[in-house]
Amino acid sequence: MNRTHIIFIGLILISFSAIIIGLISGSADISLVEFVSAFSQNNSSSVRALIMDLRLPRVFSAFAVGGLLSVSGVLMQVLLRNPLAEPYILGSSGGAAVAALMGMSYGLSAFWIDTAAFSGALSATFLVFWIANTSDNWGPSRLILTGVVLASGFSAITTMILALSSEQSVRSMLFWMMGDLSFAYSPGYLLWLLAIISLSAMIAARYLDIMSRGELQATTLGIRVPILRIAIFSITALATALSVTAVGVIGFVGLVVPHTVRLITGNKHRIVIPASVLMGGSLLVISDTLARTVLAPRQLPVGALTALLGVPLFLFLMKKSQPKS
């Protein structure tokens, strides 16, 4: 058994443990005996209803979103060849926030707020792509610069909306902007999307390896760079938009998880992609479980906890990876 196998076995065990802990933990804790008996034949207890109707969809949503953001981060770092690239760098979070907060300020229903967030995220991302693509010399630097400038504009609009909104609306707006899985009860489409994107990216892992070394080398080796670039951009835009729509804006995961995985496994994308899915999904499940339980029945913003958990881990791994003098 080589090192890669050991790493994947460890990540699978961590993911499985995180999911089980997420299912049994909450304002009403469930013992392992109750958890197992809840799934026995002909059991229709309230414990089973609590797990199946409330906790299971939320835990699976957290895992799917964590995995989607992590894979999107890997792909964006390949596309932009920038270590600071992450799923929100092209303005999707800003566009989604502006559209969703405007919907909240007008008292729209959850369906229309989700629709607005999805439309805002996609519109902002493709606006960045369209502006950058108007030049024949467009490339990673132009994409990043355009995304940063538009993100600043969206941030200003978001601040204005918060300043003009009522005090009752501001709290829900802030929670949405920091990530909120309270209403994430439809994980099915997120899990399917995660599976499709992950498998597609693993199939294209060889091309991603070459693309990460530079577009000139990729072109020399016969890769159609413009087509691959548009494919990566479209996939990450869809994944990020659906993630933001489902749980709001959760930062950090898509930035640091890919780097952490590369520190542990190396740079081969056939390994980096599935490892990022497992680590990103586990990180968000653990963060959401802590958000629900630390000050229960109050809930903490999950986006803040992902950073609190991930930053020390990343710094520790980066310190260990430094060569000894």
Image (tube, rainbow, N blue to C red):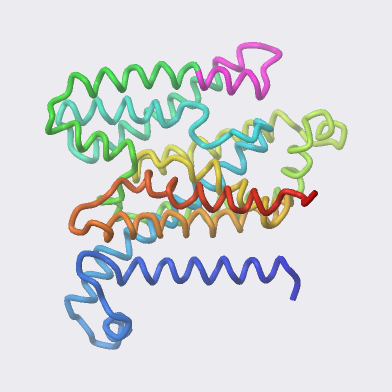
Query: In terms of depth relative to the viewer, which is nearer, 54 or 114?
Result: 54
Query: In terms of depth relative to the viewer, which is nearer, 190 or 171?
Result: 171
Residue 84: name its quadrant. top right
Q: Residue at x 20, y 69 (%)?
A: 28
The segment highlighted magenta reads 131-148
Question: Outermost residue, front direction?
Answer: 325
Residue 202 shows in this picture: no
Residue 94 shows in this picture: yes
Q: Is residue 137 left or right of residue 261?
A: right
Q: Is residue 323 left or right of residue 134?
A: right
Q: Is residue 118 left or right of residue 100?
A: right
Q: Residue at x 24, y 21 (%)?
A: 161
Q: Residue at x 43, y 48 (%)?
A: 308
- Give the vertical position of 120 relative to 21 (above or below): above
Q: Residue 318: x and y, percent?
A: 64, 48
Q: Residue 176: x and y, percent?
A: 29, 39
- Give the vertical position of 239 relative to 150 (above or below): below
Question: Outermost residue, right direction?
Answer: 220
Is the stretch drawn in magenta largely helix, strand or loop? helix
- Give the vertical position of 39 relative to 273 (above or below): below
Q: Is residue 179 left or right of residue 235?
A: left
Residue 258 is inside the magenta segment? no
Q: Residue 196: x and y, percent?
A: 55, 53
Q: Quadrant of the N terminus?
A: bottom right
Query: In terms of depth relative to the viewer, which is nearer, 67 or 286?
Result: 286
Q: Residue 78: x and y, percent?
A: 67, 38
Query: In terms of depth relative to the viewer, which is nearer, 61 or 1?
Result: 1
- Give the vertical position of 154 relative to 88 (above or below): above
